[in-house]
Amino acid sequence: MDAAPSSPTVSTLAGNGSAGTANGTGSGARFNNPTGIAVDASGNLIVCDRGSARIRKVTPGGVVTTLAGTAGTGFDDGFPATASFASPRFPAISATGDIYISDADNGAIRRINTIDGYVSTFATGIPHPIGVVFDSSGNLAVSDDTTNAIYKISPSGVVSTFVSSGLDSPGGIKYDAAGNLFVRHLGSPSILKVTPGGSVSTLAGSGIAGYLDGLGSSARFDAMVDVAPDAAGNVFVSDYSNNRIRKIDPGAVVTTYAGSGTTAGWIDGAALSARFDSPIGIALGSSGQLYVTEFNGHRIRVITP
């Protein structure tokens, strides 16, 4: 007799629910409104800790350190202890391991060198960058929620416009293996799909805020922030105001993957019984685990399939 398929479970990797900047292990560490998250080649998490204006690193074992940033906001390049950011939102990791940060309130893309940790300014001219992700050619895609556009920055730092219409407050962005770009579309709550040629379509969401599972445009989201496509063609969504993680399958059917309801809280365990507090950034690990930052919960959660 075949074993029953396992059900996803939720656990807490780091953070204790209180805002702060303390480094440490597991619940001994503190975050302050963490937002975007990315996974590096070694399985470490790179987290934009927006409230503390710092960039944090979390090992697979839950050890938290600060990569760059100081107390208070600023726009200073330099080594980790002197560099400063202003509302860092999302990280992206290049093929060489360098970390690129959307430094939203500075209107800049910052780069953290993987060798010595030096922070430099890679590009400016995008008024309020939010989502960042690399394509297969090494170009950095950047969403901007003031110009309602998606830009591309070449490896040499040349900025061009990729999508200039059909967007309203784009946020988190991620590519799938085929080069399609999935976009959080906040102004009309939905998830968009942008083909490599720049054609924009709605993958799921009615454009009306709410909570409803269903097919394509019949589904509803509320203030979702980030997306994470997997190798099987599913797209996971951090549904911030619903305190849930949603899943869009290859047929555009939307279901609830984790989270028990709109009430914020902190409960680990079976995915659909767990509680989240404003899930915001999401990223997939190499074994299919989904890492989630909680903006108001000040924690890093893990959903294990």
Image (tube, helix red, strand yellow):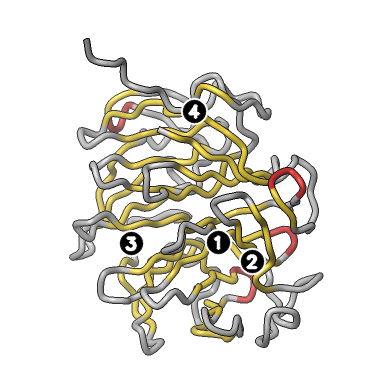
Report how far apart the C-alphas of labels 2 and 4 lie in the structure: 27 Å
Q: Where is residue 100 in the image (x, y as percent from the top left)?
A: 50, 73
Residue type at mark 2 is Ile
Q: Where is residue 229 in the image (x, y as percent from the top left)?
A: 33, 47
Q: What's the residue at 59%, 50% (across, down)?
A: 61
Task: Check disc 1 and give the amino acid type.
Answer: Ile
- Tell me where residue 266 sits by quadrant: top right
Tally of numbered discs: 4
Query: Tag 3: residue type?
Result: Ser
In what quadrant of the picture does the C terminus appear? top left
**Circle 4 crowding by C-alpha within 10 Å: few under 14, some 14–19, many from 20:** some
Q: Quadrant of the N terminus?
A: top left
Q: Name the residue under label 4.
A: 9
Query: Mark 3 against mark 2, which lies toward the viewer?
Result: 2
Mark nearer the viewer, 2 or 4:
4
Q: Residue at label 2?
A: 55
- In the drawing, does residue 53 fall left or right of residue 190? right
